[in-house]
Image (tube, rainbow, N blue to C red):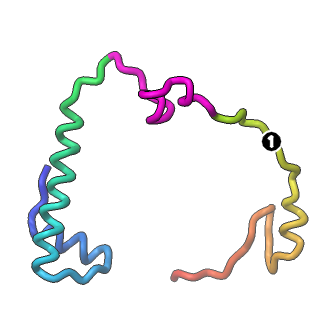
């Protein structure tokens, strides 16, 4: 997959970015480079390779799984925190509508 100048202009417009022509050309090259790298990665055969839990596990397996147990360590203080909120409902904070 590769992009052309009209794609970059459309993406910039959607992102509300004002890019000059030189910036568009530069961005086009960078984005196409990223897509080229993704295509190279997709071409690699990963059959039989188990996923890593953490990137460091490839170099130091003993550090890869040093994760804490998934247990509750704090008491539930939601009612205390929501007592000072201007508006709550069903345990959620109510906020004014920002976007129409």
Left or right: 77 in relation to 19: right
Q: Toward which corner of the image does residue 30 lie, by quadrant?
A: bottom left
Is residue 43 a member of the stretch shown in magenta?
Answer: no
Question: What residue is shown at x 36% (from left), y 20% (from top)?
Answer: 49
Near-viewer residue (4 or 23) = 23
Left or right: 25 in relation to 84: left
Near-viewer residue (65 or 17) = 65
Q: Please state the horizontal and vertical placement of residue 55, each as a whole percent of the image.
A: 44, 35
Q: Please state the horizontal and vertical placement of residue 26, each as a whole percent of the image.
A: 14, 69
Left or right: 96 in relation to 23: right
Question: What residue is shown at x 15% (from left), y 74% (from top)?
Answer: 24
**Outermost residue to the top:** 48
In the rendered image of this protein, does residue 95 appear above or below residue 60?
A: below
Q: Which residue is mark 1?
A: 72
In the rendered image of this protein, does residue 14 appear above or below residue 52?
A: below
In the rendered image of this protein, does residue 23 appear above or below residue 56?
A: below
Q: Toward which corner of the image does residue 58 lie, by quadrant?
A: top left
Span highlighted in magenta in the image? 48-66
Q: Secondary structure at mark 1?
A: loop
Is residue 57 a member of the stretch shown in magenta?
Answer: yes
Question: What residue is shown at x 43% (from left), y 28% (from top)?
Answer: 59
Q: Toward which corner of the image does residue 4 lie, by quadrant?
A: bottom left
Question: What residue is shown at x 56% (from left), y 24% (from top)?
Answer: 62
| Crowd class of label 1 (few under 14; some 14 to 19; many from 20; radius 10 Å) | few
Q: Please state the horizontal and vertical placement of residue 2, each as a whole percent of the image.
A: 12, 54
Near-viewer residue (97 or 78) = 78
């Amino acid at each position: 997959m590769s992009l052309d100048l009209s794609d970059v202009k459309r993406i910039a417009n959607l992102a509300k970015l004002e890019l000059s022509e030189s910036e568009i050309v530069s961005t086009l090259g960078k984005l196409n480079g990223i897509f080229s790298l993704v295509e190279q990665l997709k071409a690699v055969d990963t059959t039989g390779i188990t996923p890593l839990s953490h990137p460091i596990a490839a170099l130091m397996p003993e550090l890869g799984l040093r994760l804490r147990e998934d247990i509750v360590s704090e008491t539930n203080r939601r009612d205390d925190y929501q007592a000072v909120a201007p508006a709550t409902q069903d345990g959620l904070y109510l906020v004014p509508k920002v976007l129409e």
